[in-house]
Amino acid sequence: MADDTLETEYLEFMSDLRARASETGDSPENAFFETYAALASENGDCPDLEPCRIVLEGRGGYRIDGCAFDQDRGVYYVAICDVRGEDSLETLNAAQLDSLTARARRFVEQLIDPGFAAQLGEGSPEDMAGGVLVGQPALLKRVQILVFSNARLSTRKPPELSGEIGGRPVVCNVLDFGRYAAIARSQGAVEPIEVNLAALAGSPVPCLPAFTEGGGYQSYLIALPGQVLAGIYGLYGPRLLEQNVRTFLQARTKVNKGIIATLRETPEMFFAYNNGLTATASAVRTERLSDGTLGITTIEDLQIVNGGQTTASLLHARDQGASLDVVFVQMKLSVVEPQLIEEVVPRISRYANTQNRISEADFFSGHPFHVTLEQISRRLAPPPRAGALTGEKWFYERSRGQYRDSRARGTPSERRRFETEFPKAQLIEKTDLAKYELTFAARPHIVCLGAQKCFLAFAEHIATEWEAAPLSFNDGWFRAAAARALIFRWTDRMILGSDWYRSDRGHKSQTVAYTLAWLQHHLRKLGKAGLNLQLVWNQQDVTEELRAVIEALAPQVAQTLRDAPEHVRNVGEFAKQQACWALIARTEFDIPKLPEAILLDREVQKEIAREEVAVRRIDVDIEMDRLMVALAGRVDELTLFARKKGLLSPKSDAALRRLGRSQFALSPSERNALRHLFVRLAEEGFPMSATDTPATSESGRERRIQLTGTGRRQVRL
């Protein structure tokens, strides 16, 4: 049955891959790399990879399809793709895997060879892929080889050390289709990691139990050898870190110089000086040691929720030559039952990180902004395109796998109906939204940092905006966001299919971001708010006038990027800098005159925004009314839970008592108290989701009740 399910998932994947390639005009191989690279980055296997297909055939040949260099930690990631075009799932055997990794290894070996580097022409594919490593191989401390395959390994293969290149350790990490499908269907849940502590340390690691039996929770205090912790991080990297902490570290954190100094100068004092780690697991295996104490042999689903910087710095120090023989790190390990991991681990992470720079924006995956956009996207029907009878909705995916799971539900006819209503081409993922929004906010250098760093910057911005004006995120905001997605995706396809790009391929993603950012910047200088996005939404397409402007602008921007200042060796890296945007922003490009019809005046934009906020305020009130009616029969349960968690205020307590008596005509202050309480209850895990979902018109019942002191409102239950 499991094999049949995987085979079905494979056929769906290949169908989606071909559809994506057809939609974008790109090759299936490039679409495959982008799909796998995005998932690997989100999963913590690697940072955002730059596509760079480099192939040398023949004896001693090499090949890579993507790469990234983490200069702070000296880790060079290279990816090689194994793309099968068959209509049935094939097997990736050991010989094929060895051949793939050998070709990737040879590329890295050549890259750090001074003779090879000297022969590279500046701007050649190899030179661009090597970046700062070309001519400076001493920067390289370790290598990660990633194999992306749509075949299946016969047995699961965790990351493993695979020899050395020039004295640098090499880790081989395989993302076959079986693992890809498991991660994709997990909806953002953690991919299981089983750490064999006994094998890494040479024996079970002593621990001190810190819990009582029967509590449904276990905790252990451990003095973990520094060599062991560095070895674990060397194998699994950021996958060890709880996802929100991982995003934060990948995006902003440098190696801690203070930690490095302690490890070099007084390693024996590290345990005393360092705060240690907070970690979680779903299970541990223990055994009694010869002296009668308890030792941990294996940890399942290990996640570090606080102390990621310490962990990364230990590996970095070891790579720099520091000895970790006398280094120990204190670790508080909490063992959480598997069914509670998704609920409890984020809370442990949140509470453990209150003393450092990780803010609420870094815990953005559960932000109500996403819930609001999800709800709007499911009900807001766009106008039909020219020649179509009905509009096709945009599906906002706030957690990984939502679209896939929604499409898989129901009968074949129901699935076809879903795909008609929500075509795959109109799926918007969180990281896509961040890219579109920051591009039109004229921050292309942030977009070029990659999906994860771009999303973090977007999250910080949205968290601030939401706190100030949550009602501004309404139907109008979503329509504008979908219009920006339409323009961005059309621009990407246009550039890919243009003759000028085909003659000198490269830097497409940077050209798209900088082209649209310059256009928005230019319109603001003209005193406009920007493009008339409502016009794009109404047509569900890019207008002919706007197409002409972008077609004229894009090749000029691309050429300016290529003609970067002489000191710039890598255009892709230069595009990530504020200096690059400053250069493009002050450049005057020759574009057709912009018709007033496709532009939006600032005063008109303000008036539209005010109207949309007013409509959203009414919608929010109706949603609150519906929620109060739905929860009225559960007031006793709700009150008990809220009192146990210490969430009740005098005002919310009084409002709940009135709600329990079916008195819905609450004062504004009572409604606000209840609204705040409902948010806190949801955060604490009170089961409100089922009641918070409005019923469909087919199944709904209507009940006329008095909800305000001045009138009656009809609420559908």
Image (spheres, helix red, strand yellow):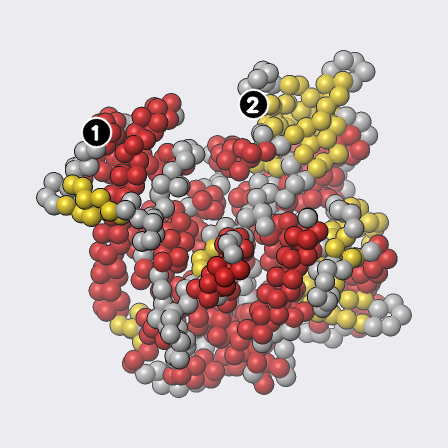
Three-letter amino acid code at the position of disc 2:
Gly
Give the spatial CA distance, label 1 vs label 2.
37 Å
Which mark sits nearer the N-terminus, 1 or 2?
2
Label 1: few (<14), some or many (≥20) within 10 Å? few
Question: Is 327 displayed left or right of 616 in the figure?
Answer: right
Q: Is residue 409 visible?
A: yes
Q: Which residue is mark 2?
A: 216
Question: Is 117 displayed left or right of 214 in the figure?
Answer: right
Instruction: Give the quadrant of the C terminus.
Output: top left
Residue 579 versus residue 199 in the image, above or below: below
- Tell me what residue is drawn at x 12 percent, y 40 percent: 709
Q: Secondary structure at mark 1?
A: loop
Residue 328 versus residue 246 in the image, above or below: above
* Residue 593 placement: quadrant: bottom left
Q: Which residue is mark 1?
A: 661
- Tell me what residue is drawn at x 83 percent, y 59 percent: 96
- Tell me what residue is drawn at x 53 percent, y 38 percent: 342
Instruction: Return the x and y of residue 425 as percentages of the image width and height.
Output: 50, 67
Instruction: Return the x and y of residue 158 as percentages of the image width and height.
Output: 74, 45
Residue 121 versus residue 156 in the image, above or below: below
Three-letter amino acid code at the position of disc 1:
Arg
Instruction: Return the x and y of residue 604 as percentages of the image width and height.
Output: 23, 69
Q: Nearer the viewer, residue 425 or 118?
A: 425
**Marks 2 and 1: in contact by CB < 8 Å?**
no
- Tell me what residue is drawn at x 64 percent, y 73 percent: 27
